[in-house]
Structures are given as structure tokens and as C-alpha cells.
Image (tube, helix red, strand yellow):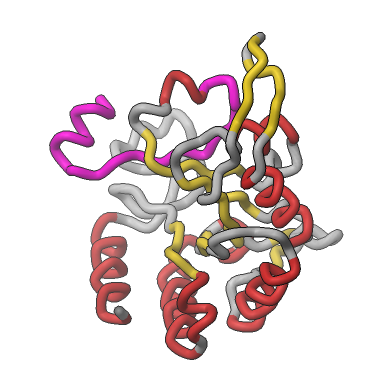
Amino acid sequence: MHIRAIEESRLTAADEMLYPDNWGYVEDILSYVAIGARSVEDQQHRMTVSGFDVAAGMKNPTSGTLSVMLNSIYAAQHPHDFIYRGHEVRTGGNPLAHAVLRGSVNKHGRSLPNYHYEDLAMLYSLYQEYDLVHPACIIDANHNNSNKQYEQQVRIVKEVMHSRKLNKDIHRMVKGVMVESYIEEGCQKIGEGIYGKSITDPCLGWEASERLIYDIAEYE
């Protein structure tokens, strides 16, 4: 199915890697991998990314601690010797490992966004303090950045694009956005059986997603 989708759309797939051991089964169809907020502190994920030949986005943890994310990028960008699926392997480091800002959760369970201009400027400043190459960032417009209010993704993306216009360093650093999108907007409970509607996080629908892509193009 994935091969057919690539052939017909000329678009390759991306994935959030939950299980590092699965990489060998999917590496030929993926051109981008994200490491989630709950996996970014795991050493096996970090070392596995260090052997990828594709870009890998390391999300900030749910606590929002940027040093954890940056340490993860550092580990992924450097070589390692470790045991992978029963074999001793050696990796060369992945220079395309980078940051993904997805918001955080405070001790009261409230969402705290980290996509604003000041957040991006701070990340750029922190990048200069670490021994990292190719400073880069993707903004996750959903999750805690939108408090899972999926319709807010449009506004968030437009604010990020505006911030890129205001600051040349932010413009260079921010490479793109993640938007949760599907055929039908919103989400459904398992068992409702609505074709094209998410059974996990709520998503933008097809029409709103299409408009947003054209709006992004106008900023450039």
C-alpha cells in the first residue's frame, strides 16, 4: 500500500518511531522520522537515530525541558557502538537530527505552548551553546501547542510563518511545521465507523488542510 501511494503521489512517508527495532522493516519507505516526547529520553532511540540516513526530529519531552531535547539531538548526531537486535553495530552519527517543538504540560496538567517568537529565539540561542551541526526546528502545531484544539493549527502555523519573516535566524532555523490532518475533520470513537476520520487525535479536514498549504506558500 505504501509503495503504491509513493508511486502515485510522488510523496514519501514519515513516521513517529515507537519501536527502534522496527527500523529495518520500514527504512525503505520513510524519508523522515520523528521521536516522540515520551521516547526522546530513551537511549536506544537516540542511538538508533544516529544510524539513520534520513532526517530525524527529536521532540521536546512533555515537561518542556529543552535541554533534554538538545541532549537527545547531540547523542543522535554523534557516532555510537551498541547492541541492536542482537548484533553489535557502529553508527556514524546523523547530522540531520533536529528539534521539534510540540508544547508541554505543567504540573496541573495544563498545556503550555512553545511556538511563539520568544520560544523560537530562545531555541536558536540554545543551539549556539551546544556542539550541534545544522541548527533546525520543526513546529508541531497540534498536541500541547494547540491543547489538541485541532482548528487552532491554522492560526499557529500562520504565527510561525510570521515569526520567520521577522528574524533571519528564525527563518533559517525553522524548516517546517507538523499538522495533524486527515480526510474528515475532528476525531471519532473506536467503533463509530466513519471513513476518513481519525480514531486518535483530532485532525484538520482535507479542505482546511489544502487551504493552509496554499497560505503557507503565500508566505514564501
Residue situated in front as seen by the camera: 81 or 159:
81
| Number of numbered discs overlaid on the protein picture | 0
Examine the structure image and report whether residue 11 is included in the region drawn in magenta: yes
Q: Is residue 211 left or right of residue 39?
A: left
User: In the rendered view, would you say 148 is above or below 156?
Assistant: above
Q: Quadrant of residue 133?
A: bottom right
Pick out the residue farthest to the right: 107
Residue situated in front as seen by the camera: 142 or 78:
78
- Where's the N terminus, which quadrant? top left
Pick out the residue farthest to the left: 8
Pick out the residue farthest to the bottom: 166
Residue situated in front as seen by the camera: 151 or 51:
51
Q: Is residue 49 left or right of residue 104?
A: left
Q: In the image, what residue occupies the spot 43% across and 58% down?
A: 179
| Boundaries of the magenta span | 1-22
Q: In the image, what residue occupies the spot 70% across and 64% down?
A: 111
Q: Position of residue 203 (x, y in %)?
A: 42, 53
Examine the structure image and report whether residue 167 is included in the region drawn in magenta: no
Residue situated in front as seen by the camera: 82 or 173:
82
Q: In the image, what residue occupies the spot 34% across and 48% down?
A: 182
Q: Position of residue 145 (x, y in %)?
A: 60, 65
Q: In the image, what residue occupies the spot 43% across and 44% down?
A: 32
Q: Position of residue 12 (x, y in %)?
A: 29, 41
Q: Is residue 51 left or right of residue 55?
A: right
Q: Is residue 125 left or right of residue 63?
A: left
- Where's the C terminus, which quadrant? bottom left
Q: Quadrant of residue 83?
A: top right
User: In the rendered view, would you say 211 is above or below 51?
Assistant: below
Q: Quadrant of residue 177?
A: bottom left
Q: Position of residue 17 (x, y in %)?
A: 55, 34
